[in-house]
Image (cartoon, grey):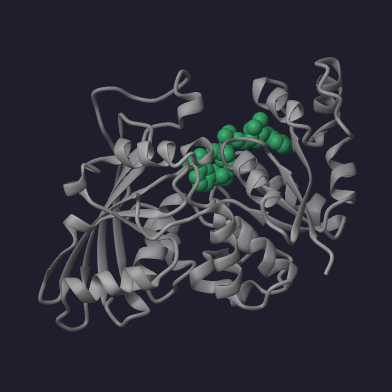
Amino acid sequence: MRATRVAVNGYGVIGKRVADAVALQDDMELVGVADVAVDYRLSLAAARNLSLFGSTADATEAMTQAGLAPAGTLHDLLGRADIVVDATPKRVGATNKARYDALGVKAIFQGGEPHDLTGLSFVAQANYTQALGHTAARVVSCNTTGLVRMLGALDSRGLLESARAVLLRRATDPWESHTSGMINTLMPEPKVPSHQGPDACTVLPDLDLVTVAAAGPFNLAHVHFVFVTAPRPTSRDEVLAALGAAPRIALVEAAAGVEAPNAVIEIARDLGRPRADVWEVAVWADTIAVDDREVVLTYMVHNESIVVPENIDAVRALSGTEPDPATSIAATDANLGMRATLP
Ligand SMILES: NC(=O)c1ccc[n+]([C@@H]2O[C@H](COP(=O)([O-])OP(=O)(O)OC[C@H]3O[C@@H](n4cnc5c(N)ncnc54)[C@H](O)[C@@H]3O)[C@@H](O)[C@H]2O)c1
């Protein structure tokens, strides 16, 4: 079978990671990356011999002037692709959809776009089959991906009646933390529920979930505290078994010194992972507390990378090259080197 030809538009935090992950899959070919920027990130892409394209005529010209030798425009790139992963900034993706549609190129958007853009919000373990053959899908945001993976794992074992969650969000991403961020404060989201709860319901419509969120002065990851009510009495062992049976959830142990997000990132560094990425939800096993029907969970979401495997599975689902979710997920996870525990 011919490899699926994948283009990436927007070579930022998400786009560059998805591009590298595509290149690791046996059944996919990265045909090029496009952007409007001409900075060190694009110079590095050029130095790595990625095919670079300008997303606009001006960007193509600027890339040429900067010596980046673009291979053409976004239009040229789309002409070589079966599917495009749009990882442009929030709300920019929506403005690109008509271009993809006009050329008959399937498209995957990110969590910054609204659900209505594609009508299909995607998390592989929850609704891969629903996406088979679709022309477009939206991979939900990092926080929503974490919530759906965790609550979906409990739900699939009959352990979820309702959930209430507190989300502590990172203030900014490391690469742009000289331009924004916060110190010595915390900013609660004014709206309850925060948008992540309703967003998770775009993937799992029957969820009884309320989220509240705040951003804080750190930039490594998000941390969620989730209070689950099970429909019947359960046990810590049963919860551990449910999490262990689900993909993309890795246990960490505070008792082994993994006490905070920085320690989880340090493990990723020591494992030699690209960009110290943690594609799994990292759950503190020590903090899993169960009392009759009440379950408490604390876990970390590495916002920069958690959606990368979901984008890869979305490519297979939309292109229809692999009908079985478990097979796609297993291939993606093996190619990335994902684990059930960290370390
Ligand atoms: N950063 C995160 O933690 C995170 C996590 C999950 C999902 N997302 C979502 O992923 C999407 C991308 O976010 P990001 O953090 O990677 O953003 P980013 O700012 O790091 O990267 C976006 C890239 O797109 C480029 N760009 C801007 N306008 C463009 C255009 N018109 N055409 C082509 N390229 C253009 C920028 O130069 C930049 O390189 C957003 O929808 C965001 O909500 C981000």
Q: Nearer the viewer, residue 89 or 28?
A: 28
Q: Nearer the viewer, residue 30 or 193?
A: 30
Q: How many marks?
A: 0
> Relative to 261, is 107 above or below?
below
Horizontal side, residue 219 vs residue 65: left or right? left
> Residue at horizontal 55%, vertical 60%?
334
* Quadrant of the rendered image containing residue 76: top right
User: Which quadrant would the N terminus be assigned to in this image?
Assistant: bottom right
Horizontal side, residue 65 vs residue 192: left or right? right
Residue 214: x and y in percent read 29, 41
> Residue at horizontal 36%, vertical 36%?
266
> Relative to 80, is 331 above or below?
below
Query: Is residue 90 visible to us here?
Result: no
Give the quadrant of ligand 1.
Answer: top right
Q: Nearer the viewer, residue 297 or 336?
A: 336
Residue 89: x and y in percent read 60, 39
Residue 17: x and y in percent read 60, 42
Query: Is residue 222 visible to us here?
Result: yes
